[in-house]
Amino acid sequence: MGKSLLNKIKVTPLKIIKSPLGNVMHALKKKELNNWVFGEAYFSKIKFDKIKSWKYHLKMTLNLVVPYGKVKFVFYSSREDLFRVIEIGEKQYSRLTVPPKIWFGFKGIGKPESIIMSLANMQHDPKEVLRCKKKSIKFDW
């Protein structure tokens, strides 16, 4: 991939603290913020074998965590015609930091469903996000 924009997607392993009453799962610490500014947090559910695609943020940086289930994220650079696939979930517990200007979609691969936590550096603005139909970007899910 060399200097691909897709290399700017950061994968940060996260800590799970085991507890007999229920585990504690880290997402983001203040010391990791650097110059990043908090905009909003939200959760999305995706059912097993379902696909949500394609989105492209013009300005927003996302931090994505899957505390329950497993999700396959597919990132696409139209400029380079390259894909990057990253799977995260309870067993590969990590945070993806995704800069703007990358197409992405995701597929639920955990049964019966998975939960994605999104921590964004700005509040949702419908003028800031582009969308296209799944078939517009050719990928074999």
Image: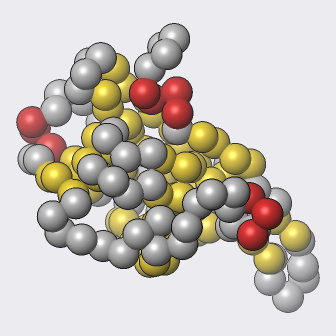
**Residue 44 at what x, y percent from top left?**
39, 72
**Along the horizontal axis of the image, is 139 left or right of 22?**
left
Report the residue that reaches farthest toward the top: 2
**Along the horizontal axis of the image, is 77 left or right of 126?**
right
**Along the horizontal axis of the image, is 98 left or right of 130?**
right
Which residue does the image show at 47% across and 65% down from the upper left?
A: 121
Where 82 sits versus 55, above or below? above
Which residue does the image show at 33% across and 20% down from the upper left?
A: 82
Q: How is the image coloured?
A: secondary structure
Q: Quadrant of residue 128?
A: bottom left
Q: Nearer the viewer, residue 66 or 47?
A: 66
Where 138 sits versus 36, above or below? above
Where 61 sits versus 68, above or below? above
Q: Nearer the viewer, residue 35 or 45?
A: 35
Q: Nearer the viewer, residue 46 or 37?
A: 37
**Residue 118 at what x, y percent from top left?**
48, 67
Report the residue that reaches farthest toward the front: 35
Report the residue that reaches farthest toward the bottom: 21
> In this view of the protein, can residue 112 be seen by the observer?
no
Q: Quadrant of the C terminus?
A: top left
> In this view of the protein, can residue 109 be seen by the observer?
yes
Which residue does the image show at 44% across and 20% down from the upper left?
A: 4
**Residue 135 at what x, y percent from top left?**
10, 38
Where 135 sits versus 79, above or below? below
Which residue does the image show at 36% across and 25% down from the upper left?
A: 83
